[in-house]
Amino acid sequence: GHVKARIRRTQEDATDETVMILVPIRETNARRHSRLVDMILEFTWPSRKQLHSAMLCDAFSMKIVEIGNARLRSAGLASVRYFREPEDLNHLNPRASAPTRHGLGAQRMRRAAIAIARNYLAFVALGGEEYQKIKWVLWLDSDLWFIPPTLISDLRSSKVDLVVPVCYCKPGTCGSSNPFVIYDRNSWRDTKEAHALL
């Protein structure tokens, strides 16, 4: 999806807390994954030694992700790993065209499959003694067009434990020319009270 995060810029919080970046990836391409890697490498978090990365990939994307992730390793991230999506998870969320995938009737099954895949990635990425020192988890979508380099510091300066973005559709891509159509409604209730917060 063509989504863009709207972030309130705040002063960078210099800290040595460890962060795990988790990215579920499905049907990516070399250009998209290269853009994701570029944005991760631009993060201004004080030390790349405090950044860990783990990605869950379908079979189609494995080779692309393997090539791109070599750049993350050479940049000195604390760890860079990727896991192949188990076949039973793959079958829960079959390939579909964008209109089918985003249709209201498909959402319950699709969102359940996405939740299961994300839980699986969190389980395999954060398991093991060496990852017990992870302080924060940052979930990223693999198809974002823009991630502020100060994102992690901005989120930490919010002084809350859980932050969820509001994602807008690119005008004309969600069946409306209105530039303020909410794209991701997994955790967003489109109410008057919610709009007052924007």
Image (cartoon, rainbow, N blue to C red):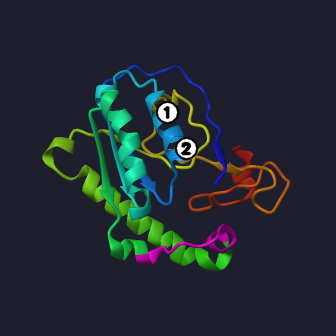
Q: Residue at x 56, y 24 (%)?
A: 10
State the mark number for residue 180: none
Based on the picture, tell me whether residue 32 belongs to the magenta stretch: no
Note whether residue 17 is visible.
no
Q: Between tags 2 and 1, which lies in front?
A: 2
**Closest to the observer: 68 or 170?**
68
Q: Quadrant of residue 50?
A: top left
Residue that protrudes farthest toward the right in the picture: 177
Question: Hey, what amino acid is under mark 2?
Answer: Arg
Q: Earlier in the sequence, mark 2 or mark 1?
A: 2
Disc 1 crowd, CA 10 A, few/some/many (<14, 14-19, 20+): some
Give the Cα separation between the discs numbered 2 and 1: 11 Å
Residue at which label 1 appears: 38
Q: Quadrant of residue 17?
A: top left
State the mark number for residue 31: 2
Note whether residue 128 is visible.
yes
Q: Residue at x 70, y 60 (%)?
A: 190
Residue that protrudes farthest toward the bottom in the picture: 105
Residues at discs 2 and 1 in contact (Cβ within 8 Å): no
| Location of the C terminus (image quadrant) | top right
Mark 2 secondary-structure assignment: helix
Rendering coords of residue 127 (x, y %): 21, 53
Question: Hey, what amino acid is under mark 1?
Answer: Asp
Q: Residue at x 48, y 21 (%)?
A: 12
Tell whether 190 sits left or right of 176.
left
Rendering coords of residue 91 (x, y %): 42, 77
Q: Which range is magenta?
A: 91-102
